Amino acid sequence: MAVPDRFGLLPAGPLLLTTEETRLLWAFVHGDIMDAAVRAWLRASLGFCPRHTWAYAVVEIELWEAGVGGRGGHQPFDVCVLYEDLCRTLSARLGRPRGWGRRAEAALAPARRCYLCTQLAGPRREGFALGYANSNSAALAAEANLLRHTRRWCAATVEEWLPSACPACLGGRSPGADDGGARLCRLHLAEAVRTRTADDAGAAARVAEAADRLASLARRLAALARSMTAAGAPADAGTEASWIEALGFFGGWQFPAYLAGIPADGAP
Ligand SMILES: [Zn+2]
Ligand SMILES: [Zn+2]
């Protein structure tokens, strides 16, 4: 069965970034994320839309060549910082015991539009738009689109993250199908809560499970970010996979599954 695309999920395939997307995301990882108003926007929008969730990671991992920690570069440091915050924030919202139904529904739905989509839809600048520090955005897009380092990350950690991948993303099954209480991504969890395809108790249990999972993910993302600092200890395999689990939860799983060579039915 085809993967449903009603959430704007990415198709299973390469992610071809445009020059303008690359220019905006490259500027984003160099500064916008530090801005308090942008951080508030990203909390309200639950990060980016599915395409820009993964595009953001691709731009940082492919283009940021130098860094500290054992790996040196091509690592998702900004991604860990942002998603540690988003996982912790959403976990707290979902973990409230009372009124889980409508409250969970509201917590799982973005209250603002994707920051990148909003910038892309803005008025076009006259003339040539310079990239961050005069970088050549077309050349950076071509480099990012090779996906060399992102592919390596996704393939190297697949055994860690595949058990956490959303079956509704990978197999096209409807959320709430009899899947043994499998772990749903945010988009399919929202669908299961909204439509109550699971009974109320089942849906409440899924929300509670997601709140616990996000709290655990936040801790692993913080450890992974520390491993990318000068004093940080190396990360173990589960910690290395945490950023893929976080982005899979927020933006769907087709892209990392494609990069790791997982067939569309989700079978390893
Ligand atoms: Zn977007
Ligand atoms: Zn899903």
Image (cartoon, rainbow, N blue to C red):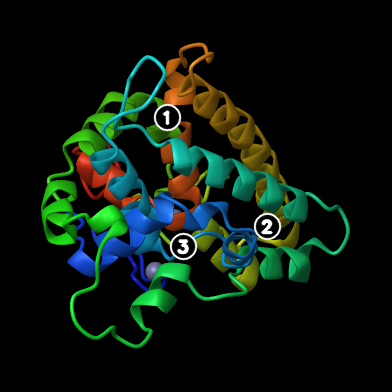
x and y percentages locating residue 62 in the rendered image: 24, 41
Which residue, given by chain and number where applicable, does mark 2 sit on? 203
Quarter of the picture containing the C terminus is: top left
Q: Return the disc, 2 or 3, that comes first in the chain's sequence.
A: 3
Mark 3, Cα crowd under 10 Å, few <14 / some 14-19 / many 20+, is many
Q: Which residue is mark 1?
A: 241
Please report contact status of discs 3 and 1: CB closer than 8 Å, yes or no.
Answer: no
Q: Position of residue 76 (x, y in %)?
A: 40, 37
Residue denoted by label 3: 48
Q: Residues within 10 Å of mark 2 (few under 14, many from 20)?
A: many
Residue 196: tell me if it is visible.
no
Mark 3: C-beta under 8 Å from nearest atom of ligand 1: yes
The residue under the point 46% across, 43% down is 79
Q: Give 68 or 90, whichever is nearer the viewer.
A: 68
Question: Cα distance, mark 2 to mark 1?
Answer: 27 Å
Q: Position of residue 171 (x, y in %)?
A: 33, 52
81 or 220: nearer the viewer:
81
Alpha carbons under labels 3 and 1: distance apart: 20 Å
SS label for mark 1: loop
The picture quadrant where one finds residue 39 is bottom right
Question: Do callouts 2 and 1 mark residues in contact (Cβ within 8 Å)?
Answer: no
Disc with the residue nearer the chain's start (3 vs 1) = 3
Task: Name the residue: 54% across, 57% down.
Answer: 186
Q: The residue under label 3 is which amino acid type?
A: Phe
